Image: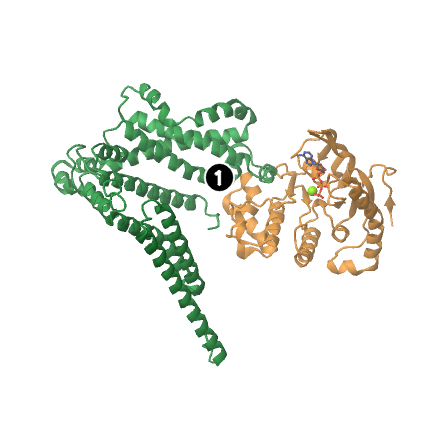
Chain colours: A orange, B green
Amino acid sequence: MKLSGAQASPPRETATAAKIISRNVTKIYPTVRGPMTALTDFNLDVADGEFVSVVGPSGCGKSTYLRILAGLDTLSAGSVLIRPGADPRKPLNSVVFQEYAVFPWKTVIDNVAFGLEMRGVARAERLETAAYWLERVGLRKFAGYYPHQISGGMKQRVSIVRALANDPEVLLMDEPLGALDAQTRIVLQDELLRIWEETRKTVVYITHSLDEAILLSDRVILMTAHPGRHLATFEIDIPRPRTVETMNIARFAELRGAVWDLLGKEVARAMELQT
Amino acid sequence: MNTPTDPDTLARRRAGRLAFWRGLSSLIAAAIAWNGVFFAAGLWFPLWWLGLFGDFVLAVMVAERVGRVVPLRGRRAYERTLAFGFPVLALVAWQVIVDAGILSATWFPQPTRIAQALWEMTVSYDRFSQTSLIGRPWLIPEVVAQSGWAAGWGLIAESHVWATLGRVGAGFVLGAIPGVLLGVVMGMNKTVRLMLDTTLSAIYVLPKIAIFPIVMLMFADPFGEGPKIVVVALAVFFLMTINSMAGVRDIDPVFLMAGRNYGARGFQMLRHVIIPAALPVIFAGLRLALGTALIVIISVEFLRAKQGVGFITFYYWEVLNPEKMYAGLVVVMILGILLTYLLQWLERRVMPWQRD
Ligand SMILES: Nc1ncnc2c1ncn2[C@@H]1O[C@H](COP(=O)(O)OP(=O)(O)OP(=O)(O)O)[C@@H](O)[C@H]1O
Ligand SMILES: [Mg+2]
């Protein structure tokens, strides 16, 4: 098992060109009680076609980092870069938000086609793309429904395929399965695995679930509790294709134990910080 | 459904039915006793409010008892009966109380007499205001044959109802559209908001009737339609500005982030994210603005108009014809209900995603 310690590890040298380069990302929120450091000196490079998960105690700045990557928030110091691809018309990134952020005023299919519509793709073409993605996650029948008419799990699937239909250079997902019940969650993990192994998009994936992080990722990044900084990196060397069955193999349990060793302590520290 | 036959169930049902009728008849007996005591002791006049309160409580108890035995299928009919039955009951009570001489028929004419007055005002030409509530539609066939459709329309346009409706409609549209637009801009742009918010709040609280004289001065024809429409528009404008601003500021920021992340910019953002997200609040504001518009136009017509429902209501008050004055108020209420329905219809058309 390759295990690189926190501060000791130099920025990872990637063989393929890095798709995402973030250096010393720091975010300080000005609040009434003075500046509040949410994220400090966070480094992360993600290779083209790599699936990287970020795990850390609640409030450690994971969403903040993702928003900065997406260009939805400013950074106080450091830099982030997403390398554009060959096709300049492709969007750089699409976010699956922690809250679903599916537009209640648009039908399911119009939600999925939203990114394409904003880029001026003709109606027939964008509806065809959206229908294809709805078909893939079993929501074809619900194309004409409004979000309030479908379940939470379906809404989150809509939010995921809205990002996929947009065909971005990198996919940024913030706890996309966080609010789901255990069964739906397993089904969607399987679906995500299948889709990712076919599309091989560059993904930054935030989750609270260790199982999910290990199952889906090539690499798992651990963050410290408040203020967030890099704690450790784990290479997940379980061969693909994987399915939810992969969680039963010995190597999985081994990795899980190693990650939890560090994360458990950090979570405990985070809870002490709160009191 | 299967009918149970075992004696236990049947017996329990019979006992239940018996208890229900016993409860109901004792409530009715209580109602008779309550009112009887009030009459006999001559308490109705000084303590009419207490009598009515007691009657209301008894009516609620009766309705609750009946509601408990209404089968699921009859639920809607039962609820509708309550919703419409109560106002009808109140009208009947009014009628009975005035007929019995407890309230003065001069100041509180019975509903039947108000209805009669309303009918008269609708179908007969009033020589003083030179029209009727709905104009002179009975002359339409004749006039159209003689001088064409425009003249025929004139017979409707001269009516009191049309005068009021036209002012409310024109003022509402003229105030609501710029109001919503400015409110949205203020919701999105902090600088504009800081510059205008205080001023708008200050003007908003002014009773619009108080600035009517100033508005009149701004027009070449101070007694024409212009000032009346503008004063309604002003009332609607300020309300809608403040309301739409609140609606936009209340938008969940995650929707704005999603809009931006998926490439919406400028006008697209407005059209696909901001406006639809704020629409529920904007429509709630339009409902309030409609009420305000009616209040303003009726008071303006009280003050200064030769035509309109408010004018005719006040006129009949001045000539001491209370039946017709009440009839005027009834027309205002009917207009309010109809315009609200229109707005609700529009709301369903514009926001098909709203659950009902
Ligand atoms: N707009 C803001 N102003 C001030 N502080 C903020 C703001 N947004 C986030 N924070 C703070 O920054 C820290 C990191 O927040 P963030 O949402 O990134 O955490 P997170 O790791 O995503 O947590 P979770 O796992 O619970 O989603 C938190 O302590 C939060 O209170
Ligand atoms: Mg978060």
- Asked if the residue at label 1 sits under 8 Å from ligand 1, the reply is no
Q: Is residue A50 visible?
A: no
The answer, for residue B243, to whether it is visible in the render is yes
Helix or strand or loop: what does disc 1 sit on?
helix
Q: Residue at x 44, y 74 (%)?
A: B14
Q: Position of residue B244 (x, y in %)?
A: 48, 34
The residue lying at 79 percent from left, 42 percent from top is A270
Q: Chain of mark 1?
A: B
Left or right: residue A1 versus residue A164 is right
Residue B215: x and y, percent? 34, 22
Near mark 1 (Cα within 10 A), the count class, few <14, some 14-19 or many ≥20, is some
Q: Which residue is mark 1?
A: B281
Is A207 or B330 nearer to us in this picture?
A: B330
Question: Relative to residue A167, is residue B35 drawn left or right?
Answer: left
Residue B167, by quadrant, is top left
- In the rendered image, the vertical position of residue B16 relative to residue A269, given as above or below: below
Q: What amino acid is at disc 1?
A: Val
Rendered location of residue A68, percent (x, y): 69, 35
Residue at 63 percent of width and 47 percent of height: A164
Q: Is residue A162 above or below residue A33?
A: below
- Answer with left or right where residue A62 lies relative to residue A113: right
Residue in the foreground of this view, choosing between B74 and A198: B74
Q: Quadrant of ligand 2?
A: top right
Determine the image quadrant of residue A58. top right
Quadrant location, the C terminus of chain A: top right
User: How far across and down, in percent of the image, does residue B238 sit?
Assistant: 43, 29
Question: Which quadrant would residue A98 be assigned to in this image?
Answer: top right
Foreground of the two, A239 or B156: B156
**Of A62 and A189, which appears nearest the observer?**
A62
Please name the residue shown 33% across and 21% down the image: B213
Numbered disc total: 1
